[in-house]
Image (cartoon, grey):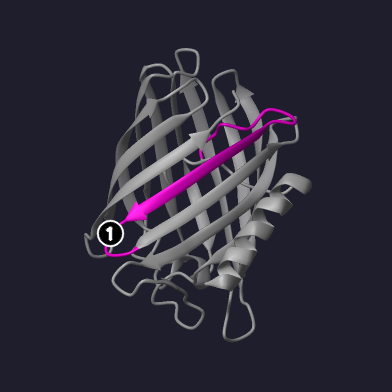
Amino acid sequence: MKKIGVLSGLLVLLSLSLPTLAQQTYFNVPSSDIVEKHELSVQQQFTIAESIRSGTTVSFGLGREWEVGANLYNLDYKPSAHRFMRNDSTTGQAYSPLLLLNTQKAFDITDQLELAIGAQTGFNLTPDRPAQWVGYLYGHVAGSLHDEHYNWSFGGYTANARYLGDGPRAGFQAGFDAGIFYQKFHLLGDWISGGHDLGQLVLGVEVYLGKHFPVALGWQRINRDGQQALVLQLTYNPE
């Protein structure tokens, strides 16, 4: 646990000192919102079931519709065991925890339509054996309506088994953000196909505590076995 704490601290320091990677997400699917040049956004997500899974994303805008950042994913705490969990040996579930770098670049098609390409890559932390590489690559078409009050994206992904867990290595993903009362109350949702650890549907609501501080609460259902969980997501968005 001490190693995880130290590495988490290093991640924060790196994210503030390097042009690293990280997309914001609806819940799990990267959104088309690119951070403005020299701006920094932060997103923290907790998935709560029998265990609590934490995912942290820090994003930095490079300009020209390009962002980079860092992620600390799959930091799992099991309350019944009173300890953090790790997986570095089986693809029955995704490896954990993961330290990732990522990037996303958008290309305008029209004023309301764009193509986005992104990737995440890194290694698992605190392994008993040599750390293993994990990777995820995606591309999607994203659109907006009504002055970007309503946003959606749809596309495909591919990743290795250590990132996804056992199951198909490629599939589809989609997401939406509906600003019913813009920057006050939004409906959010996303879906990732596949019977692996990442394949799931999440639907929820987002409430803005301030212009830059939305808080989202979602219901998650795993494709593979129908298991359900609660998702809490906190975001700082400089826009």
Give the image quarter of residue 59. Answer: top right
125 vs 84, nearest the viewer: 84
Residue carrying label 1: 49
x and y percentages locating residue 122 in the rendered image: 64, 64
> Residue 171 at x, y = what percent?
43, 56
Identity, as a three-letter code, of the amino acid under mark 1: Ala
Q: Which residues are magenta?
A: 31-51
Q: Residue at x 23, y 60 (%)?
A: 227
Q: Residue furthest bottom?
A: 129
Task: Tell whether position 208 is magenta.
Answer: no
State whether residue 76 is above or below residue 151: below
Foreground pick, 28 / 124: 124
Circle 1: element type: loop
- Tell me what residue is drawn at x 75 percent, y 35 percent: 62
Q: Is residue 19 visible?
A: no
Residue 10 spot, x, y in % from top left: 68, 59
Report the residue that reaches farthest toward the top.
146
The quadrant of the picture occupied by the C terminus is: top right
In this rendering, would 68 be left or right of 141? right
Q: Residues within 10 Å of mark 1 (few under 14, many from 20)?
A: some
Estimate the x, y position of residue 168 in percent, counting from the top left: 42, 67
Is residue 62 positioned above or below 123 on the image?
Answer: above
Residue 225 seen anywhere in this rendered image of the structure = yes
Total number of numbered labels? 1
Asked if residue 38 lies in the magenta stretch, the reply is yes
User: In the displayed structure, would residue 83 be above or below residue 41?
Assistant: below
